Image (cartoon, helix red, strand yellow):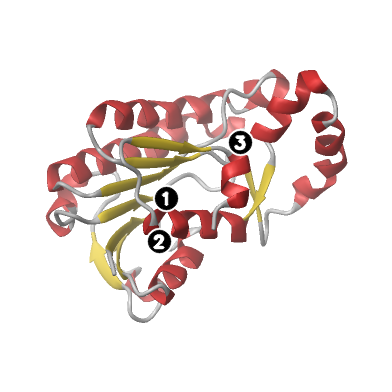
């Protein structure tokens, strides 16, 4: 059993991940804003603080914890470039610094697939840049870390990319486009939760990166 500290636990991925971790026997502690504790499942311990300010919760992170950082802007789009810096990047950096100060055992970070060529890359340039800043910080932090790089996570309310599946199939059969098509492939919410839970159970030594093919096959 591990003690797992989760930020973004009431979000799209977090509210599915926490029950999965508890089913595995882990003790889960989740950071939430005051008044949001009721959104957590029974058995999950709420810690109140501001995800953008590590000083508000660092004392609740313990030496040896597994830290899972899930905070981010919902439904990323080019119009949210400033939010990516103000929320995704700021919360990620705060989490890394708090985790390092606490002496955690393993940091798990959900980033985004990159590089992304062409139109998709230009559309999501700001999002990729914000997540890459946090990845770079993890690389020099000295923390053991697992970085997951999904491109788009299919699930309730996030299903429109299913129409792109025939184009992905075609691209994977064109040698010059195969690597990009696989790196920027679609993953399901179930696959993400499984990959995250697997990462908790199998902590990295150093920094490991899980691209889309690895996320699909985890566990």
Q: Is residue 173 above or below residue 195?
A: above
Give how far across and how far down residue 18 sits, in percent: 42, 67
- Which comes sooner in the sequence, label 1 or label 3? 1
| Residue found at x 60% / y 28% | 124
**Residue 44 percent location from the top left of the image:** 32, 74
Evaluate whether residue 12 shows in this view.
no
Mark 1 in CB contact with mark 2 (< 8 angstroms) = yes
Q: Which residue bears the numbered disc 1?
A: 70
Residue linked to disc 2: 9
Secondary element under disc 3, as helix, strand or loop, is loop
Say which label, 1 or 2, has the lower sequence index. 2
Inter-mark Cα distance, 2 to 3: 22 Å
- The residue to which callout 3 is attached is 77
CA–CA distance between discs 1 and 3?
A: 18 Å
Q: Would you place residue 79 above or below residue 118 in this image?
A: below
Image coordinates for residue 144, horizontal then vertical, percent: 29, 40
Among numbered discs 2 and 3, the one appearing first in the sequence: 2
Whole-percent x and y of residue 89?
Answer: 38, 34
């Amino acid at each position: 059993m591990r003690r797992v500290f989760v930020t973004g636990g009431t979000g799209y991925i977090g509210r599915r991940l926490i029950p999965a971790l508890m089913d595995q026997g882990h003790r889960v502690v989740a950071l939430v804003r005051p008044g949001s504790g009721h959104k957590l499942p029974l058995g999950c311990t709420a810690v109140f603080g501001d995800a953008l300010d590590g000083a508000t919760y660092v004392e609740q992170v313990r030496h040896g914890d597994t830290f899972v950082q899930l905070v981010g802007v919902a439904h990323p789009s080019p119009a949210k470039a400033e939010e990516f810096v103000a929320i995704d990047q700021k919360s990620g950096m705060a989490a890394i610094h708090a985790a390092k100060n606490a002496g955690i055992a393993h940091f798990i970070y959900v980033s985004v697939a990159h590089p992304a060529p062409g139109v998709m890359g230009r559309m999501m340039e700001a999002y990729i840049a914000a997540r890459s800043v946090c990845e770079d910080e993890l690389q020099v932090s000295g923390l053991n870390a697992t970085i997951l790089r999904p491109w788009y996570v299919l699930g309730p309310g996030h299903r429109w990319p299913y129409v792109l599946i025939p184009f992905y199939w075609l691209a994977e059969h064109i040698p010059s486009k195969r690597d990009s098509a696989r790196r920027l492939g679609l993953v399901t919410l179930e696959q993400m939760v499984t990959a995250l839970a697997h990462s908790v159970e199998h902590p990295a030594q150093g920094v490991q990166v899980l691209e889309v093919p690895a996320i699909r096959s985890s566990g």
